[in-house]
Amino acid sequence: MEPYRIKAVEPIPTTTRQQRVSALDRVGYNLFGLRAEEVMIDLLTDSGTGALSAAQWAAGVAGDESYAGSRSFHRFREAVEELTSYPYILPVHQGRAAERVLFSALLVPGQITLSNTHFDTTRANVALSGCQARDLPCPRARNLHRPEPFKGDIDLDGLAAQLRGPDSSRIALVIMTLTNNGEGGQPVSMDNLARAAALCREHGVPLFLDAARFAENAYLVTQCESAYGGHSPTDVAKEAFRLADGCLMSAKKDGIVHIGGFLGLRDEALARRCELTLIATEGFPTYGGLAGRDLEMITQGLTEALDPRYLRSRAEAAAHLAALCRGTGVRLVEPPGLHALYLDAGHLLPHIAPHRFPGHALACALYVEGGIRSVELGSLYLGKEDSNGDPVVSAPYELLRLALPRRTYTRTHLDHVGQSLEAVVRNKDRVPGYRIVEDAPLLRHFRARLEPVLAGPGIVGTTGAAPDHGEGPDDRSESAQNRSRARRAVAAPPATDGRRPA
């Protein structure tokens, strides 16, 4: 059972199918644009969406709101330093602020950053610095459906080749993302992290952790890495931080708070440069854009996030939802992590070409069916098209992420997700693809507007329109009539085969 009881509740909005269809059309088929009251179960992200504990709320009441030198900051700094061993701790309002502060002080245009996989805002902040982000996921990461542990590892041979190669002088830092969100929420082993740290030291390149989910990574290490079977998550986390030169932390994940983060550093000169940017853009170094109550809540949350009982409950919730998804015939990135499940939309919807975004198509269908908001991690997130909408770069996999907010939803909420997915799967051939009608040069998945396009045999049978297989630029001139048919396909209720719809 969950190691807590519920003390306060928030009503879940109830919407009709037609209301959800209208909402999707209004926001240009981008689930980021939905209003919260239009969402029944929100699995868009686990960032800042968890429930605070009674101890966190109590700590917040004791927050010291002094502009400089508050008691809350000193308690926060001492707790973070004890966990990470870094002598310089700079609070920020969230992880992407830590990225911007660090990169503005460390990166020079033309340099390279290496990672097991850069998170989306990390990649964007590298690009905004005039630098290039290169991902080096381990070979095991390509085997999505094989339940091998530690698919989040960095490719050590690839890392060594980069550090010794012709571009070695341009490499500014290595970032290890724990857990590896871009590779299905998979953990990084301590052995891999230690070997990567040794390579970085050998070549004089600083190693940083993107530690947003450090506690979940530590828990998975205790479960899957034999050398750490008897260790506590706290012990593993401390060792991981000590292997690196610093960290970027979004406390909205494993700090279990609604806002906040920090930058941890060993190098004093670098810390001083970062501090100047912090003061100019975030706030004085003893609050960094946060209220004293936020600092207090993070301090308490970092302790609660490492509680083995809490982490076990996270793992069991993810396993429960994974079993429901597998029961529908949907393939997952295996083994499931803790913060999210990643569904193989490309395998489920083979009639939708990558540049018609099968992951996003599944997300839209799941929202229409059950009011569930999720997010694509595929070619909408990582791909690129030319001016005709034809693919230039496609993602290696077309995934849908179901993120699990911390201490927020019960098993019956997850059952609703499974039932809704089952209804979508029964009618998967009726799911249309999508095309972008408004784009952005960076992080397009946040703000792009899309429209459905007919795709697949089920749609042909329903509307009588020709399928869109993404064969060329002609479909850019698709008639308004066919676009209307595609919208009706989104809105069409599922065929239930005599069964009650979820």
Image (cartoon, rainbow, N blue to C red):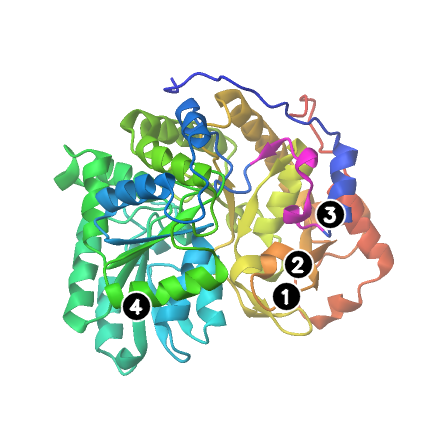
Label 3 residue SS: helix
For disc 1, the marked residue is: 440
For disc 4, the marked residue is: 173
Q: Amino acid at mark 1?
A: Ala
Q: Amino acid at mark 3?
A: Ile
The x and y percentages for residue 150 are: 28, 47
Q: Is 11 rendered above or below residue 353?
A: above
**Closer to the observer: label 4 or label 1?**
4
Give the quadrant of residue 348.
Answer: top right
Left or right of residue 289, residue 90 in this image: left
* Closer to us: 500 or 369: 369
Q: Is residue 69 magenta?
A: no
Label 2 vs 4, first from the N-terminus: 4
Q: Is 108 rendered above or below residue 85?
A: below
Query: Callout 2 environment at 10 Å: few (<14), some (14 to 19), or many (20+)?
Result: some
* Dots 2, 4 in contact, CB < 8 A: no
The x and y percentages for residue 221 are: 23, 40
Label 3 vs 1, first from the N-terminus: 1
The x and y percentages for residue 258 are: 49, 39
Mark 2–mark 3 Cα distance, whole angstroms, equals 24 Å
Mark 2–mark 1 Cα distance, whole angstroms, equals 7 Å
At 18% across and 38% down in the image, what residue appears? 235
